[in-house]
Amino acid sequence: MTRILGCEQIESGECPGDWEKLPPAGETDIRVCPVCLKAVYRCASPEEVRLRAAVGLRAALAD
């Protein structure tokens, strides 16, 4: 599972919460959430997640 971080929809249960359940967006490390229609970036490290979240992007980090 590759958890999606920074999404308000996860708490409500609307967001899939798992990057692997999102449809591909044409890029290897980017997918689009069908609920909020925002890009979700797969990150290689917690630091990359923090950097993306700091500018308001959705990110996912593999467990």
Image (cartoon, rainbow, N blue to C red):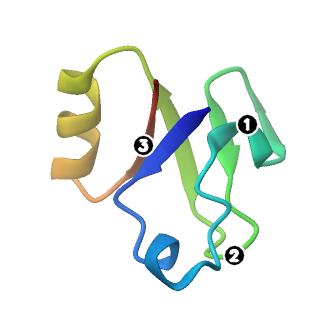
From this view, report whether residue 44 is shown above or below residue 41: above
Disc number lying in front (1 or 3): 1
Circles 1 and 3, Cβ within 8 Å, touching? The answer is: no
Does label 2 or label 3 sit earlier along the sequence?
2
Does label 1 or label 2 sit earlier along the sequence?
1
User: Which mark, by number, is residue 59?
Assistant: 3
* Cα distance in 3D space between marks 1 and 2: 15 Å
Farthest-out residue, top? 44
* Cα distance in 3D space between marks 1 and 3: 12 Å
Label 1: how many Cα within 10 Å (few below 14, some 14–19, many 20+): some
Q: Is residue 29 left or right of residue 49?
A: right
Quarter assignment of residue 7: bottom left
Where is residue 45 shown, x and y percent of the image? 30, 17
Residue appearing at x 70%, y 20% in the figure? 28
User: Disc 2 on helix, strand or loop?
Assistant: loop
Where is residue 11 shown, x and y percent of the image? 44, 77
Label 2: how many Cα within 10 Å (few below 14, some 14–19, many 20+): few
Which residue type does callout 2 highlight?
Answer: Val
User: Disc 1 on helix, strand or loop?
Assistant: helix
Residue position marked by numbered label 2 in the rendering: 35
Figure label count: 3
Q: Is residue 1 left or right of residue 44?
A: right
Residue position marked by numbered label 1 in the rendering: 20
Which residue type does callout 1 highlight?
Answer: Glu
Which residue type does callout 3 highlight?
Answer: Ala
Residue appearing at x 42%, y 43% in the figure? 59
Does label 1 or label 3 sit earlier along the sequence?
1
Circles 2 and 3, Cβ within 8 Å, touching? The answer is: no
Residue appearing at x 18%, y 38% in the figure? 50
Where is residue 27 shown, x and y percent of the image? 72, 27
Residue appearing at x 28%, y 59% in the figure? 56
From this view, report whether residue 2 is shown above or below residue 11: above
